[in-house]
Amino acid sequence: MDNQWQYKVEQAVARIREFDHEAAERAQRHSDSLTKPPGSLGKLEAIACQLAGISGQLWPDMSRKTVIVMAGDHGVCEEGVSAFPPEVTPQMVLNFLSGGAAVNVLARQAGADVICVDVGVNAELEHPQLVSRKVVRGTANMAKQPAMSREQALQAIAVGIELVDEQVAAGVRVFATGEMGIGNTTASSAIASVLTGLSPEQSVGSGTGINGEARARKIDAVKRAIALNKPDASDPVDVLAKVGGAEIAGLVGVIIGAAANGCPVVIDGFISSAAALAASRIAEQAKPYMIASHLSQEQGHQGLLEAIGLTPMIRLEMRLGEGTGAVLSFHFIDAALKLMQEMATFESAGVSKG
């Protein structure tokens, strides 16, 4: 069975087209012809050129946007690493499905859809809008044993890939990563430490709002998990299986799936960036398809972005997750494309060029 999921992941990686540098350069030339000093719109110009390189088109249609919120539980919560109990994960999933979470509000404002996926929640959930693709009923406590088997990690990645394939077939052209899982900043800190070399003291932040003694417990849990499981930094699937989470692996699949379908994927905060780094190690050619949305308050986030080679668009001191920062960034994508489409050129406006 391991081979089945491995094959699906490898197939998706093989589908990723090379970034179209010629289209990106065409977009840059067009941007330079607009009525403004060259480069004066900063990251908006860079985004427009990146979208051209991803799509191969100067003005791609990016109107259909979706944030995929992957949900899963974490056995490491037994170690007292979160300010909230594990029961909050299924409760928040129902909140997403009823439209009451922060990401729902921001997605409505951005004209985007929210898809909530149960890939690893430790509860039986039923709702007409829930996408149920459960791989595990919560991970095991990584401080005592591997969080998942390799097969489960690969299956969760395959879930993300399949979901993106389905959404692209339905007309979606831009994706954002979102997640829900009490304990998942602990897993993400472990992934960050293994894949970047950051110490647990550097990678572990406040998560749901812990500090002092609780943060010391969290650092200790990450250290023990890494020492016990010995995840192989050269094998990102091994890292995801031993110290990751089903929802993090699911997001790895979303990122690879978006690239395989020639679509940009907007990366949210710390947890999504841990998934993005793992995805980039599995498929380096997926990197140009990633857009970093924001720099969160989680102290390990900057190190993750630097390891991937991404620069965030905004800094709003957020640390909620769910996909909130990524969905906010949809507005900047729309703005970048509108500027390319609607601004006058020096020639058309009769303006003297400097």
Image (cartoon, helix red, strand yellow):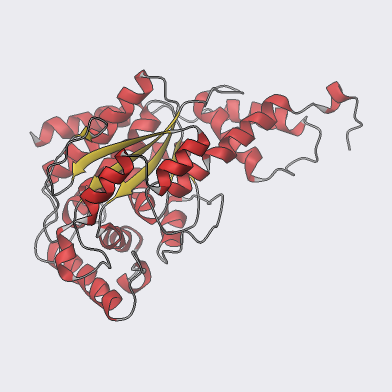
Q: Is residue 327 left or right of residue 250?
A: right
Quadrant where the image shows the N terminus: top left
- The residue at the far bottom in this view is 213
Residue under the point 62% across and 30% down: 337
Q: Position of residue 145 (x, y in %)?
A: 9, 61
Q: Position of residue 253 (x, y in %)?
A: 29, 37
Q: Is residue 79 left or right of residue 38?
A: left
Is residue 281 in sight in this rendering?
A: no
Is residue 88 in sight in this rendering?
A: yes
Residue 91 vertical position relative to residue 133 in the rendered view, above or below: below
Q: Nearer the viewer, residue 204 or 338?
A: 338
Q: What number of labels is visible?
A: 0
Q: Nearer the viewer, residue 200 or 270?
A: 270
Q: Is residue 61 left or right of residue 91?
A: right
Residue 63 vertical position relative to residue 118 in the rendered view, above or below: above
Residue under the point 33% across and 60% down: 192
Quadrant where the image shows the C terminus: top right
Q: Position of residue 275 (x, y in %)?
A: 33, 48
Q: Quadrant of residue 60?
A: top right
Residue 26 vertical position relative to residue 315 in the rendered view, above or below: above
Residue under the point 54% across and 58% down: 316
Q: Position of residue 223 (x, y in %)?
A: 22, 71
Residue under the point 19% across and 58% down: 86
Q: Quadrant of residue 267?
A: top left
